[in-house]
Amino acid sequence: MNDEVLDAYVEAGRIASRVLKAGAGLVRPGASLLETVEEIEGMVLGAGAGLAFPLNCSLNEAAAHDTACEGDERVFAEGDLVKLDLGVHLDGIVADTALTVDLGDHGLLVEAARAALDAALALARPGVEAGAIGAAIQAAIEGYGYRPVANLGGHGLDRYLLHGPPSIPNIGHPGGAVLAEGDAVAIEPFASTGSGMVSEAARAEIYGQVARRPARLPAARRAVELVAERQGMPFSRRWLEIPRRDLVLAGLVRDGIFRTYPVLHDVPGSFVAQAEHTIVVIEDGCLVTTA
Ligand code: MN
Ligand code: MN
């Protein structure tokens, strides 16, 4: 990784950290989810950066991939456990960071996710196996009496690429990828009171382009044109202002040009907490860009 790219990781991380912390302060009982999401996304654009994906705002048993929809009438309530997951990019160089706002009495669950992230960061250096990091995450979360979410995990980052190698499990695996100097990696433990496995809901608010094939219908071609500047990075249904949007989107998904990112949730009635930082692996450890 050259100095220019490293500087971009650091600057994207600085913006993401500042915006996420400010955003957490907006999550209060009675606040509108839509207004909060739009305000936080606006802070990123106001800082001169781009959104690497729509702000994820996932409640309670939802672990990830929820966000506001147009006309969303949801308000945060007493007792809610709110995950905010923010992606900032500068020319495709990404900072991916998340925290959990507790509007109830889930303090230990939030602490479990944070402690697991701290344990992972303490291990991250060249030569460490991803599985050893997963084992540290699992041990920290189980130490609090909760389950790590086994089918979500951390991931490598590259320019305009959100989910590349190495993948960092949230449970102990023998071996796996080995961290190397210059790797940019997002590490994201999830602690759950539920099963520790997430499944896909029917609801999807987040989409991404996965193929460059030409779309057949003019309305679909227009949607593809509007989304092209994302360069494959996810976008929100709410961002796409075109007539008959949902029909057009469904057609593009059916044709394999777009994909959905359905809301991922643990069992009904459970609670999931998340903590996430982006790191760059350096000679003697790691630089946490989103600290
Ligand atoms: Mn994230
Ligand atoms: Mn991530």
Image (cartoon, rainbow, N blue to C red):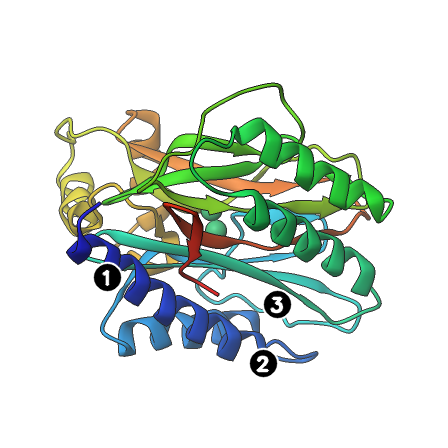
Mark 2 / mark 1, whichever is N-terminal: 1
> In the image, what residue type sits under mark 1?
Asp
Q: Residue 106 sits in which quadrant? A: bottom right
Read off the residue under disc 1: 7
On screen, residue 26 above or below 232: below
Q: Residue 212 sits in which quadrant? A: top left
Read off the residue under disc 2: 25
Query: Residue shown at 33%/71% (left/top)?
Result: 44
Q: Is residue 221 left or right of residue 132?
A: left
Q: CA distance from mark 3 to mark 2?
A: 18 Å
Please indicate, yes or no, whether residue 22 appears anywhere in the rendered image: yes
Circle 3: element type: loop
Count residues near mark 1 (Cα–Cα under 10 Å), then give few for <14, some for 14-19, many for 20+.
few
Query: Residue shown at 58%/27% (left/top)?
Result: 131
> In the image, what residue type sits under mark 3?
Arg
Residue 229 on image: x %, y %: 16, 51
Kindly give the residue lying farthest to the right in the view shown: 145
> In the image, what residue type sits under mark 2?
Gly
Asked whether the beta carbons under mark 2 and mark 1 sit within 8 Å of each other, the answer is no
On screen, residue 39 above or below 84: below
Q: Residue 184 sits in which quadrant? A: top left
Read off the residue under disc 3: 74
Count residues near mark 2 (Cα–Cα under 10 Å), then give few for <14, some for 14-19, many for 20+.
few
Q: Nearer the viewer, mark 2 or mark 1?
A: 1
Q: Is residue 147 left or right of residue 251?
A: right
Query: Residue shown at 59%/41% (left/top)?
Result: 264
Residue 86 on image: x %, y %: 44, 60
Q: CA distance from mark 2 to mark 1?
A: 28 Å
Residue 164 on image: x %, y %: 36, 33
Q: Nearer the viewer, mark 1 or mark 3?
A: 1
Mark carried by residue 254 = none
Asked whether the beta carbons under mark 1 and mark 3 sit within 8 Å of each other, the answer is no
